Image (spheres, rainbow, N blue to C red):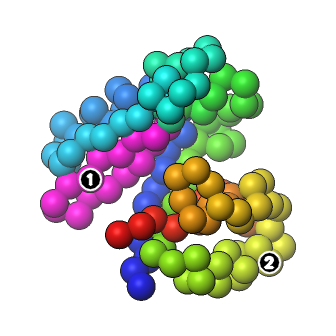
């Protein structure tokens, strides 16, 4: 089993520029998926649905553009912490503990891109995404 945590930054239209800037600072590989790439052709289709910069020096950051139909206040929800594991059993244990006093935003369920995915705001106001990645 392997667990990673990554800071995930939330933007409204600036995710690509931010990721390109962080890549210029820290190096690494840039990977992005737009909403259009994922089949969503609504307003904002060219914005980033998922993006990251990952470098051999250990730097790793993720970012996306909050969809236009979702409220966004950078002072309130500028980031979340992504916790990724390799098995549903592993992440379910962390999820169960994080839910103490939390507000569940998205229940932990299978998703198109993960064997399990959930989002919550913990009792301290920090938003966590917990999911499973294969391989």
- Count the marks: 2
Badge 2: few (under 14), some or many (20 or more) residues near its Cα, within 10 Å? Answer: few
Q: Quadrant of residue 10?
A: top right
The answer to if 57 sits in the magenta stretch is yes
If you read the primary sequence from the N terminus, does the residue marked by circle 2 or circle 1 appear first?
A: 1
The dot on residue 72 is: none
- The correct choice, above or below, for 35 with respect to 116 in the image is above
Tell me if 42 is positioned left or right of 124 in this view.
left
Residue 126 in view here: no
Mark 2 lies on residue: 100
Residue at 51% over, 78% down:
87
For the residues labelled 2 and 1, say whether their Cβ atoms are less than 8 Å apart.
Answer: no
Front one among 10 and 47 = 47
Q: Which residues are magenta?
A: 50-64
Q: Is residue 21 left or right of residue 75?
A: left
Q: Is residue 2 above or below residue 49?
A: below
Q: Secondary structure at mark 2?
A: loop
């Amino acid at each position: 089993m392997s667990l990673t945590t990554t800071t995930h930054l939330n933007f409204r239209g600036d995710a690509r520029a931010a990721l390109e800037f962080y890549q210029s600072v820290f190096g690494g590989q840039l990977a992005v998926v737009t909403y259009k790439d994922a089949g969503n052709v609504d307003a904002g289709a060219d914005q980033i649905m998922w993006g990251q910069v990952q470098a051999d020096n250990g730097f790793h950051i993720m970012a996306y553009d909050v969809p236009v139909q979702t409220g966004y206040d950078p002072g309130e929800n500028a980031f979340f912490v992504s916790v990724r594991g390799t098995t549903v059993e592993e992440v379910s244990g962390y999820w169960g503990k994080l839910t103490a006093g939390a507000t569940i935003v998205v229940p932990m369920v299978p998703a198109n891109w993960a064997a399990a995915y959930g989002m919550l705001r913990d009792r301290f106001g920090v938003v966590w995404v917990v999911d499973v990645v294969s391989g």
